[in-house]
Amino acid sequence: MQLKGQGAIELSSRTTAGTLVGQGATEYLVLLAVVLIVALVSVALLGFFPGMASDAQQTQSKTYWASASPISIIEWGARNSLANGGAGPELTVPYLRLRNTGAYTITITKMLVDGYSASRAWTGGWAPDGPIAYQMGPGEEIEIGRPPYFTPDPGSGNRRFFPFITNGGGKSVSSGSFYNIPASYCTRTAPYGTFVVNNFGFEYTVTVEGQTLTKRQIGAKPLAIKCTNAPYDW
């Protein structure tokens, strides 16, 4: 009788242990399913509300470029415009405040956009386009952009205009302008959109120990600028 009782106890223990193991596995699967559902819902929401995705992209881009080296972007903006008294062409013109975070004086000679480069830009005032030569010593800053869009033109000639980024035309680069480079452009109606450019960067020269070197800095993150204000036509 004692052996039978002992066998019953052992059987009961094995049954309980098996139940606990099975219960633990079930709880794990339920938890995993909940995590997957939450992830799918999050992805679906980001797709359904594109503004959420663009806000995240803007934050990542701004964080990346603010800490980039040796050329960081510490302030920016972008705006839609029509040139020639509003007759066109349609433009998206960004404004950038750059800082040299390196240890040497650098001179930016080209702006790079998605595999294309421009070595000329419209210079201070409303002068014709000229060679890009944005020089910054260590820790120095420079603003580039089109002054009427953001701040008054100081008239000192030290502010350089960014090459035009146009929304139409063939995929090419001319003097002082990028034409129809793949990008998301600023629109003419609210909420004005996000200006996104892939493979954005700079070509620059730096002199180290008497030797002048030409280097490139291309961002690992796209330039993603929230378009601001209504269009400014000129």
Image: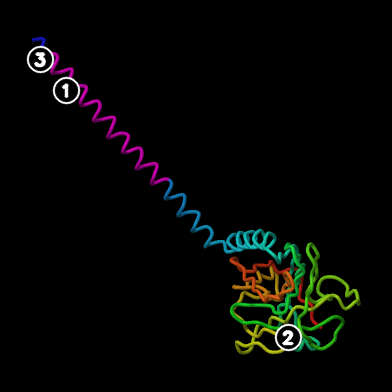
Q: What is the x, y in percent for residue 7?
A: 13, 18
Look at mark 2 in the image and give the residue it sits on. 176
Kind of residue indicated by mark 3? Lys
- Give the prevailing secondary structure in the magenta stretch: helix
Front residue (pair 116, 209): 209
Look at mark 3 in the image and give the residue it sits on. 4
Q: Is residue 219 above or below residue 89?
A: above
In the image, taking residue 21 as reference, residue 47 lies left or right, namely right
Cα–Cα span, label 3 and label 2? 96 Å
Question: Which circle's residue, 3 or 2, is located before the other in the chain?
Answer: 3
Q: What is the x, y in percent for residue 170?
A: 61, 89
Q: Is residue 84 above or below residue 151?
A: below
Q: What is the x, y in percent for residue 153?
A: 88, 75
Front residue (pair 91, 126): 126
Question: Looking at the image, do the residues carrying marks 3 and 1 touch, with CB atoms under 8 Å apart?
Answer: no
Q: Which quadrant of the figure has residue 225?
A: bottom right
